[in-house]
Image (spheres, rainbow, N blue to C red):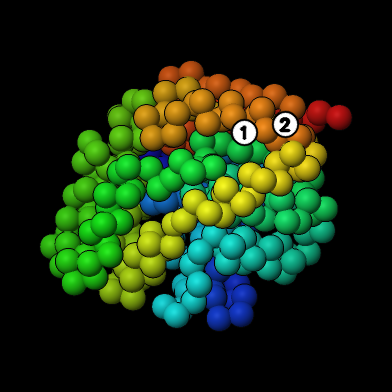
Amino acid sequence: MLPKDQPLQKNMVELGDVTVAYIDQGKGRPILLVHGIPTSSYLWRNVIRDLEGEFRLIAPDLMGLGDTETPLDHRYDMEAQAEKLLELADRLELDTFTLVCHDQGGAAAQWLAVHNPERIERFIMTNCVCYDNWPVPVVARFAKILRLKPAAFLMNRLGLSDLWAKSPVGIRLGMHNPKAVSDFAIEEYSKVNRMGPDKFEQFRLFTLAGDYRYTMEAAKMFCEFDRPTIIVWGGNDRLLNVSWGRKLYDDIAGARRMEVVPFAGHFLQEEKPELVAKYIREFMSEE
């Protein structure tokens, strides 16, 4: 295992009937980092390592992903995810915090931000779902299988979920350089497939809860959201084109600038973590 693939230690906290797993490293102004699908807080590990000497970095696993344990009768939609993120911030006594998001975690983050702007110090959006651009085609096709519960569980028992994750149309589809992500990292992201039927069902419920109405409703409030915002986008994203980042920059009242990361795909935190950290650091130092 390469040093860059080493997972960071997680804490566990009970928030209602959900046991949330989260990374909490460093000291200073708090930054809450939100991942998407099919990843986990592991996505942010090298960004955290770069910044932990200057800030407090908190990266939770969303309900249905990573090591967070969620009852099967719980809501998994993006409003519920946003509420749980805010509960975590309250438990950690974060009056205000910088919010950073990626992929489907961006839907929860946008909902949280526009409904609680007084809690947001700054907002940093990276290659995230927005408006009506999700689920992206590859996730939509996968969701069709997951809707057929017996077929989904048979696929999982046969190990096909893991094979898909490592395939050219799995996580590597989201990379500009497919070799930039190791098999070890992909196994860490896809471990929900190997954690038993209840955990796989949580993942299935998360996936099926995807609905762009949350981002469409949040977008209606962008013209009023004046918290300092920056858009950081992998310029070679085949899943969410850079034009979506430019639309966010145009529509969000508080948007200050947009940075396009060259030679980086959807999972720019895997390919260019040092640049993601650089833009966060610079933005945090601005007036």
Q: Is residue 220 positioned above or below 286 on the image?
A: below
Which mark, residue 145? none
Q: Which residue is rendered at x = 47% and y = 32% of the image? A: 268
Q: Looking at the image, do the residues carrying marks 2 and 1 touch, with CB atoms under 8 Å apart?
A: yes
**Picture quarter with the N terminus:** top left
Q: Which residue is rendered at x = 27% and y = 49% of the image? A: 141
Amino acid type at mark 1: Leu
| Residue 211 percent across, percent down from the top left | 46, 56
Q: Which residue is rendered at x = 62% and y = 75% of the image? A: 15
Work out whether residue 222 or residue 163 is closer to the camera in this orientation and state it. Answer: 222
286 left or right of 36? right
Work out whether residue 146 or residue 224 is closer to the camera in this orientation and state it. Answer: 224
Q: Residue 232 appears in which quarter of the rendering? A: top right
Q: CA distance from mark 2 to mark 1?
A: 8 Å
Which mark, residue 248? 1
Q: Is residue 246 positioned above or below 68 on the image?
A: above
Q: Is residue 112 positioned above or below 226 on the image?
A: below
Q: Residue 131 appears in which quarter of the rendering? A: top right
Q: Residue furthest top?
A: 262
| Residue 202 percent across, percent down from the top left | 39, 69
Q: Which residue is rendered at x = 64% and y = 65% of the image? A: 83
| Residue 45 percent across, percent down from the top left | 52, 45
Which mark, residue 255? 2
Q: Quick one: SS at disc 1?
A: helix
